[in-house]
Amino acid sequence: MIYFLRGKVAHIDEDTVIMDVRDVGYQVLVSHIEDYEIGEEVFIYTYEVVREDDQYLVGFRTLEEKAVFLALIKVKGLGPKSAIGALSATTPQQVINAIASNNVAYLKKLPGIGGKAAAQIILDLKDD
């Protein structure tokens, strides 16, 4: 498993960065793509998704963001792409606050999170 990457941003796509790590390019799905610049030296914590038909890295600037992501993907019906998409529109602390205050309305506003998913997030994560 790849725990983190340190290298330069070589390319930026819609929701991924290509990191040059010692002349090897890693494509990493990230939240807040606007926070990255080509040529910038970055340190990204990673989570590797391996599925029967897909394999990719998800990246995080902080361990807090990674922890919230890992909690979200444990929720029934919420996958890695939905979780990182939701984090792209908010901060980890805002997600934590929404869960703690049972704020379904806030969670429903996040991309890829509907009413059922928002309620399930609170149900599954309220006491974590």
Image (cartoon, rainbow, N blue to C red):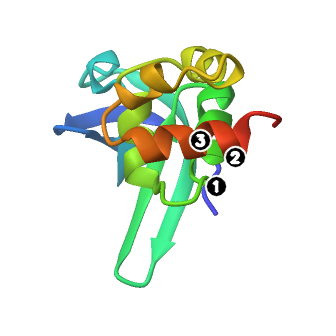
Q: Which residue is mark 2?
A: 124
Q: Label 2 vs label 1: CA separation?
A: 8 Å
Instruction: Decide: few, some or many residues near mark 2? Use Cα within 10 Å; few <14, some 14-19, many ≥20.
Output: some
Q: Position of residue 34 (x, y in %)?
A: 26, 19
Residue furthest to the bottom: 52
Q: Amino acid at mark 2?
A: Asp
Q: Tell me what residue is drawn at x 49 percent, y 38 percent.
A: 118
**Looking at the image, is mark 2 or mark 1 earlier in the sequence?**
1
In the image, 96: left or right of 73? right
Secondary structure found at label 3: helix
Q: Is residue 14 left or right of residue 36?
A: left
Tell me the residue that label 3 is attached to: 121
Residue lying at 40% horizontally and 34% vertically, measured from the top left: 86
Percent coordinates x, y for residue 106 in the rendering: 45, 19
Dot 1: element: loop
For the residues labelled 2 and 1, say whether their Cβ atoms are less than 8 Å apart.
yes
Give the mark nearest the N terminus, 1 or 3.
1
Q: In the figure, residue 15 lies in which quadrant?
A: top left
* In this rendering, the label closer to the viewer, 2 or 1: 2
Give the residue type at disc 1. Lys
Q: Can you identify the residue that label 1 sits on? A: 74
Q: Quadrant location of the N terminus?
A: bottom right
| Residue at figure coordinates x 55%, y 20% from the top left | 103
Q: Position of residue 104 (x, y in %)?
A: 51, 27
Q: Which mark is residue 59?
A: none
Do the residues bearing badges 2 and 3 touch, measured as CB atoms within 8 Å?
yes
